[in-house]
Image (cartoon, grey):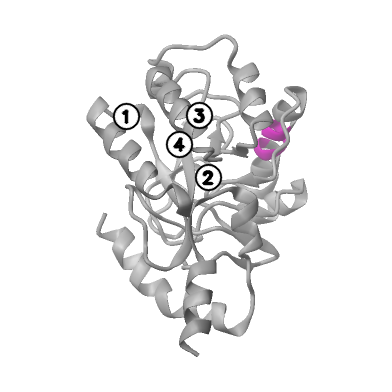
Amino acid sequence: MINTIKKFISKNTGMLIRLDDIADNMNWHLMDKCETLFDSLNVKPLLGVIPNNCDQELKAYEKKNDFWNRVRNWQTKGWEISMHGFSHVYDTETKKKDYFGYGGKSEFFGHDYETQLKKINQGLKKFREERIKVRSFFAPNHTYDQNTLRALKASGIKNIIDGYGLVPYSENDLNFIPQLFYKEIMLPFGIQSTQIHLNYWKEEQFLVFKNFVIENSTKVISFDEALKRLKNNYFSKIINFSTKGALKGIRYLR
């Protein structure tokens, strides 16, 4: 029994590194450093690429005119390219009525189905034009509503890099890979993604991240490896149900 539990924990402990706000305008100095780090350790992160970046904060950073060439090169390396919203511009307020009860401003929440579907399809069209395969999505500021989920399914996107839980799960005919923390935390059990906003880092924050990745490189997993851990058996459902409240509480106290 003990060996069975240990084996289960070992098979279901890992972290998918999720980098947010990847766009033509971004902190390329630190992005280049992260790329060198990942290549040295054969780490395959998931990059949240904004297909039509209109975020004025990001626009203040250096622009790379060969951006889409870089994205294609990352995908060739086996890095997962995920769609991170459409324009990354917030125009609604959720008041914690969004799908995860997260709260705050949103690019998607509150818009009708047709508007959200149009945004998602326009984003996917851009990726197709740039010959980038996209299998997943996560919304800016974690904010979705039922129209968002409906539009994602209609557009063929079945994987969301967000949610509460200790293992990937399926809900409303969609797959969710939980995203729990905003800093480098490796839990003793669970499959999660970690949210990295390198655009706002200083050099010392990169060094902390670098040391964390080096120390935990054997536990860092790819998107495909995370999907393989997708389980809908009774034990996994009990784990996610019993931890959801506590994980939501931790997020509210961020």
Can residue 246 be seen at all in this image of the molecule? yes
Extent of the magenta region: 119-124
Which secondary structure lies at badge 2? loop
Q: Earlier in the sequence, mark 3 or mark 4?
A: 3
Q: Earlier in the sequence, mark 3 or mark 1?
A: 3
Describe residue 202's horizontal placement relative to residue 190 as left or right: left
Residue at numbered disc 1: 200
Q: Earlier in the sequence, mark 2 or mark 1?
A: 2
Residue placed at 70% from the left, 26% from the top? 126
Q: Which mark is residue 96?
A: none
Residue at numbered disc 4: 90
Q: Earlier in the sequence, mark 3 or mark 2?
A: 3
Which secondary structure lies at badge 1? helix
The quarter holding residue 85 reads: top right
Residue 65, image x and y in percent? 57, 9
Which secondary structure lies at badge 3? strand
Q: Earlier in the sequence, mark 4 or mark 1?
A: 4
For the residues labelled 3 and 4, the Cα–Cα distance comes to 17 Å
Q: Amino acid at mark 3?
A: Ile
- Which quadrant would the C terminus be assigned to in this image? bottom left
Which secondary structure lies at badge 4? loop
Query: In the image, which is nearer the foreground, mark 3 or mark 2?
Result: 3
Q: State yes or no: discs 3 and 4 in contact (Cβ < 8 Å).
A: no
Query: In the image, which is nearer the foreground, mark 2 or mark 1?
Result: 1
For the residues labelled 4 and 1, the Cα–Cα distance comes to 18 Å
Q: State yes or no: discs 4 and 1 in contact (Cβ < 8 Å).
A: no
For the residues labelled 4 and 2, the Cα–Cα distance comes to 11 Å
Residue at numbered disc 3: 22
Can residue 147 be seen at all in this image of the molecule? no
Which SS does the magenta portion mostly show? helix
For the residues labelled 3 and 2, the Cα–Cα distance comes to 13 Å
Residue placed at 61% from the left, 45% from the top? 137
